[in-house]
Image (cartoon, grey):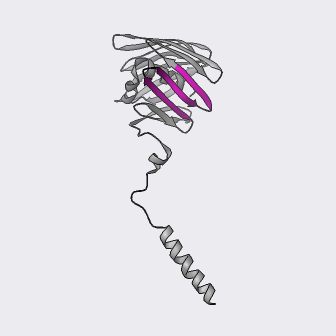
Amino acid sequence: MKTTTLGLVFASVALALGCQYDPNFPSQEELYDVPEAHDVLLVRPAEGRFFTVKVGAQDLFGPDVRLSIYNEPADHSVRGSLWGRPVNVEVGNGTAQGAVGVTTFQLAVRREGDALHAVGTVQTEPSDFTLTKDRLTGRIGDCEYDVKRTEKQTFEGSRGCNGPGQMLTMKIPDELQQWGDVGSATALALLLSHS
């Protein structure tokens, strides 16, 4: 009886000590090295499926997206994983070239006034798209886009993927511009070719 009582007292003290909150304990973000997100890129087709990706100064991340842009003197690239496929794309002066899984990725990007124009191969498909502050038009992978700005960061219009176009709502946050012309065109092409 004495041993049982002593054991219960010890267990109660240990439990009470173990459940105390330490205010200096790192946050979940610090523990899991998740960068602070500034805003969210959202793609919502009319059929109700959607995905969101948090946009940071150097990272894009979501449930199946983990991409980072590297701007080191010897390393200019977008790397990570996208829907279970490794991404390794070198970005340079006006070009992006690399692989997504076993598929090649290649874009030539140039600024034409306030428009960003990209031409290349995405998901083995010829791609040619233009992004302005008010509109995204053209082909990315096997989908044709024609969306117009309706609010500050919201675009609405149609997307047709090997068939008739369907309504689409997208939110493209301004933070994506921090990736530069080639980086932001690469990020959009990667995300929209897999949506």
Look at the picture and state if 114 lies above or below 38.
Answer: above
Q: In the image, residue 159 lies at what x, y percent?
A: 53, 22
147 sits left or right of 89 in the view = left
The answer to whether residue 110 of the structure is visible from this angle is yes
Residue at the limit of the structure toward the bottom, as seen here: 1
Q: Nearer the viewer, residue 44 or 61?
A: 61
Residue 76 magenta-highlighted: yes
The answer to whether residue 193 of the structure is visible from this angle is no
Q: Nearer the viewer, residue 187 or 71?
A: 71
The structure residue drawn at horizontal position 59% and vertical position 86%, both measured from the top left corner, is 5
Q: Nearer the viewer, residue 87 or 175?
A: 87
* The C terminus sits in image quarter: top right
Q: In the image, residue 74 lies at what x, y percent?
A: 46, 20
**Bounds of the magenta span?**
64-89
Residue at the limit of the structure toward the right, as seen here: 102
The structure residue drawn at horizontal position 44% and vertical position 26%, both measured from the top left corner, is 156
Look at the picture and state if 6 lies above or below 54.
Answer: below
Q: In the image, residue 90 lies at what x, y percent?
A: 51, 18
Look at the picture and state if 31 lies above or below 60.
Answer: below
Q: Report which quarter residue 73 is drawn in.
A: top left
59 sits left or right of 152 in the view = right
Please identify the dominant SS of the magenta region: strand
Q: Nearer the viewer, residue 74 or 141?
A: 74
Residue 78 magenta-highlighted: yes
Q: How many marks?
A: 0
Q: In the image, residue 108 lies at what x, y percent?
A: 48, 10
* The N terminus sits in image quarter: bottom right
The structure residue drawn at horizontal position 48% and vertical position 30%, both measured from the top left corner, is 68
